Image: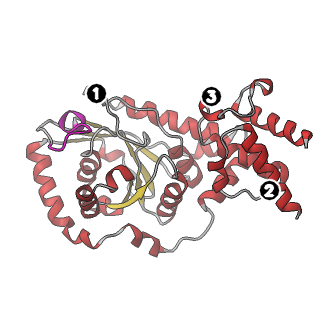
């Protein structure tokens, strides 16, 4: 029943087409030469300024591919997760950064130094973004994606976009729910200097796709993607311990 | 052609879970009925399957109303028959 939609999505995302390792070069920047220096500074900030706690890091799969899916309420979020997962995993992670960040010159420089990042348009043109993420996962790397699609202006979770469910089901990779706490109070949208607030990054157990992939045989694929997205929303919400 | 319209109306109704008779031809089905935009892909996948059309992704962005869907289907059926 859901196989038709699934096949159509696979065609749109080019899931079954071969991918060259060279594709990953599109995420790289000469500025990444400054990355060790950048993270040396971030490590100090995270330890002494934000007093970052990392909870449940053992829940991350040992090796990629997988999707890291955190809540998003601050421009600090991606950097906090990058700090929490450590150098090896950070280098294997590819981030879909919204054009909102990418189109700001200073932020753009920091993104290029700190992350393997790709500019995406979550509103008008999400197919190229999902296609790029598919390729990264097929090449055995990890993708960082904010299921809310944008930053929350209130600190509360926004409704999730179903695209993360499509990506997970059609590539068959697990999704790791992550809740970042404290970044909203430290530096909410519209603020540019972070306050010294304690930050906690909590990793939940991965959501594996086997049951959902089987579910596509008997249900419209869209509703299977939606189920994954709803489960992710529930799991991320359950990682919140008070903000 | 009326038959095509009726078939597409039935297909869309089944996917967006709104009664056929309640779907107005010129309203944005995504905003009017609170339908997720990704269901547009489901609709095109249904057309793809039912009429054997090869629907490019640009068409997903073009469909907002029932009439848009019918127009896209007509265009592609005509193109296929040409």
> Helix or strand or loop: what does disc 2 sit on?
helix
The span from disc 3 to disc 1 (Cα, nearest Å) is 37 Å
Q: Is residue A114 visible?
A: yes
Q: How many marks?
A: 3
Chain letter behind tag 1 = A
The span from disc 2 to disc 3 (Cα, nearest Å) is 26 Å
Magenta stretch: give its range.
A183-193
Is residue B40 placed above or below A18 in the rendered structure?
above
Q: Which residue is mark 3?
A: B32
Sequence-earlier tag: 2 or 3:
3
Pick the residue in front: A221 or A27.
A27
Magenta segment, prevailing SS (helix, strand or loop): loop
Question: Which residue is most to the front?
Answer: B26
- Residue A196 within the segment the image draws in magenta: no
The span from disc 1 to disc 2 (Cα, nearest Å) is 53 Å
> What residue do we see at 39% from left, 34% from top?
A236
Q: Position of residue B54 (x, y in %)?
A: 76, 59
> What residue do we see at 30% from left, 46% from top?
A57
Q: Which image quadrant for residue B20?
A: top right
Q: Which image quadrant for residue A215?
A: top right
Chain letter behind tag 3 = B
How busy is the neighbourhood of tag 1: few (under 14 within 10 Å), some, or many (20 plus)?
few
> Helix or strand or loop: what does disc 1 sit on?
loop
> What residue do we see at 84% from left, 51% from top?
B51
Q: Which residue is mark 2?
A: B76
Q: Quadrant of the N terminus of chain B?
A: top right
Q: Horizontally, is B74 left or right of B17 in the view?
A: right
Pick the residue in front: A122 or A4.
A122
Q: Which residue is mark 1?
A: A241
């Amino acid at each position: 029943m859901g196989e038709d939609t699934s096949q159509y999505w696979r065609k749109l995302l080019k899931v079954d087409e071969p991918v060259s390792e060279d594709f990953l070069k599109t995420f790289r920047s000469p500025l990444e030469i400054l990355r060790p220096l950048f993270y040396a500074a971030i490590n100090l900030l995270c330890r002494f300024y934000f007093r970052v706690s990392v909870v449940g890091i053992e829940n991350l799969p040992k090796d990629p591919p997988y999707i890291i899916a955190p809540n998003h309420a601050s421009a600090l979020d991606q950097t906090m997760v990058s700090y929490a997962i450590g150098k090896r995993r950070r280098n294997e992670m590819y981030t879909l950064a919204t054009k909102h960040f990418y189109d700001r010159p200073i932020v753009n420089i920091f993104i290029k130094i700190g992350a393997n990042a790709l500019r995406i348009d979550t509103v008008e043109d999400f197919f190229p973004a999902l296609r790029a993420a598919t390729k990264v996962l097929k090449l055995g790397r990890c993708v960082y994606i904010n299921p809310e699609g944008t930053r929350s202006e209130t600190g509360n979770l926004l409704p999730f976009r179903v695209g993360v469910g499509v990506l997970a089901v059609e590539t068959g990779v697990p999704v790791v729910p992550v809740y970042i706490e404290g970044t909203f109070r430290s530096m909410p949208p519209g603020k540019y200097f972070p306050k010294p607030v304690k930050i906690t990054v909590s990793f939940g157990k991965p959501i594996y796709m086997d049951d959902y992939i089987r579910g596509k045989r008997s249900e419209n694929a869209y509703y299977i993607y939606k189920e994954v997205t709803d489960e992710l929303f529930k799991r991320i919400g359950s990682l919140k311990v008070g903000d | 052609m009326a038959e095509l319209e009726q078939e597409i109306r039935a297909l869309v109704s089944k996917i967006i879970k709104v009664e056929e008779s309640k779907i107005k031809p010129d309203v944005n089905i995504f905003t009017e009925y609170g339908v997720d935009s990704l269901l547009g892909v489901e609709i095109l996948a249904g057309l793809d399957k039912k009429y054997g059309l090869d629907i490019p992704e640009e068409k997903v962005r073009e469909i907002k109303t029932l009439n848009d869907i019918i127009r896209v289907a007509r265009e592609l059926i005509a193109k296929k028959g040409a």
